[in-house]
Image (cartoon, rainbow, N blue to C red):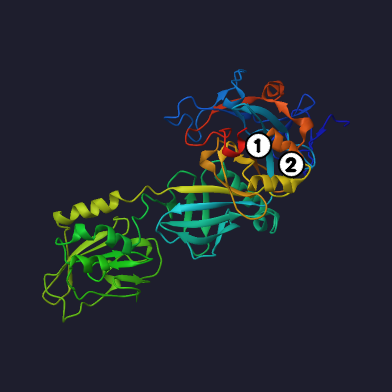
Amino acid sequence: MADDALRCDACPVLCYIKPGRTGSCDRYGNHNGQLVRLDPHVMLERAQSRGESLVPFLGKAREWDGNLVTDAETFVTAIGAGTTYPDYKPAPFIISSQVDGVDMVTVVTEGIFSYCGVKLKIDTDRHLGAECSTVRAQGEAVGHVTTSEYGSQMLSLGGVRHLTGGSRQEGNVTCDTLLHLCNGRAVDLEIDNGAKLVVQAGQPPIVDGVREERMRVGCGSATIGMFAKQWFGKVDEVVVVDDHITGVLSEHQAGKLLGVSETGIRMRGRRSTPGRYFKVAEPGTSWGGTNITDPLSILEPFDREIAKPGLRFLMVSTTGEQYAYYELDESLQPLEKDLPPSLQDSVARLRENCEPALCTVLFMGGAGGSLRAGVTENPVKLTLSVRDALTRVTSGGAPVYVWPGGGITYMVDVSRMPENAFGYVPTPALVAPIEFTMKLVDYAGLGGHMDYVRPLSSIQQEDHGLRRLESRDDNPWPLESGKSWQK
Ligand code: SF4
């Protein structure tokens, strides 16, 4: 072009890039008249020691020193590999290797994912917002609250409706939010009529300004089951306060089997099965994920026919963070007293059994569309090959879970991937690394781009940088010989 600008054709945006400048996504630049992928291309080297993790998430990388070890010890990831567009062009790298004497091929590309999102697991009992409530970042809708899981609240973020189905601003903020989360950075979120959150992969969530410490040990009923023996004989009654199922020792099957006597306690809420109560309070961010700050507020007056003055009872939350000990006075009113030493161990044990609260970020994307054409001229054959376990899918060398059914819809735990593995394009869409590894003979069989297969050694001549990382020892080695890969 007249002003020496180059046209980048790696995505539909087709940026014109002047010398010394970068395109809209900052992934490509015009370097002395050459269009170059600016981030280094990441190679994984098989960790020498499988005993400890050599490269923790966000750990240090070394610059490539030019030495290649054997094919089977080096894995070419798609991080920094670049993208080809339109999809009928072969993927940027189609690398041959030998594994246990078998000729293999790995097809490597940075996929552009319009259909993608994040499943965010937040280990907390606290109520973050009602199911289906909108989750916002920078005021824009980026997802929703979905079904909670055991001890965790779940958010579903991103997806094509937020990326491209709303306003431009909504799409850009959604893309930005996904990018930050997938690259291991902290993100501020706010749930309509719910909590304000700071979430980051591998870190404790911060809920309304409070850093979460622990997951709950279990629901109230499970907690009764786990600790009934430790309470037996030391206290007459225990109530484990939980937004899901509040447990009552004397009525619970565990208490019955141990021979705990009736206490005359009467609970608010809806009795499910003996010793298990639903909806004792409203959801909230206090005791056991309820809105109560005074545990006595979930009790009705004791049954005067059964309860006796001096009756001892403990109320405790499912994390053991909150607890209170009471004894009934002559008029059967609870009087709060210090927790007796005989009960302190059980509360401490309950807390000890609560795992650290973390945020987990799973990227989920659909590679079952046109991306497949960069691998084969007959895309459905790639899908079938993945289904038949002839082709292994990895993301930045990390293992993925491929959903059963149609297409290649996969999930990957971003904390098992190398740092900054994700990018974006302003369509907007996320760019995620994806590698397909299979036997060379199978690649030929599914109509692969055989003329573009090249050896690992050819990568040294590439004009952009290479970065070597040692593989995480808790990830399976992507080239580990599988049953379907043997001779
Ligand atoms: S957004 Fe990035 S990949 Fe797309 S054309 Fe521009 S520079 Fe190339």
Q: Residue at x 64, y 25 (%)?
A: 466
Extreme front residue here? 487
Residue 162 falls in which quadrant of the image?
A: bottom right
Is 279 located above or below residue 69 in the figure?
below
What crowding class fits label 2: few (fewer than 14 Cα within 10 Å), some (14-19), or many (20 or more)? some
Inspect the image, locate mark 2, and give the three-letter code of the amino acid beneath it: Leu
* Location of mark 1 (residue): 438
- Decide if residue 404 is on the left or right side of residue 340: right
Image spot of residue 194 (x, y percent)? 48, 62
* Location of mark 2 (residue): 446
Name the foreground residue: 118 vs 252. Answer: 252
Earlier sequence position, callout 2 versus callout 1: 1
**Distance from mark 1 CB to nearest ligand 1 atom below 8 Å:** no
What crowding class fits label 1: few (fewer than 14 Cα within 10 Å), some (14-19), or many (20 or more)? many
Q: Residue at x 48, y 52 (%)?
A: 121
- Decide if residue 380 is on the left or right side of residue 98: right
Is 366 located above or below residue 224 in the figure?
above
Callout 2 secondary element:
loop
Name the foreground residue: 396 vs 12. Answer: 396
Image spot of residue 202 (x, y percent)? 46, 43
Extreme right residue here? 2
Q: Quadrant of the C terminus?
A: top right
Quarter of the picture for ligand 1? Answer: top right
Residue 465 falls in which quadrant of the image?
A: top right
Give the CA separation, mark 2 to mark 1. 11 Å
Inspect the image, locate mark 1, and give the three-letter code of the amino acid beneath it: Met
Q: Determine whether label 2 and label 1 are within 8 Å by CB.
A: yes
Name the foreground residue: 422 vs 192. Answer: 422
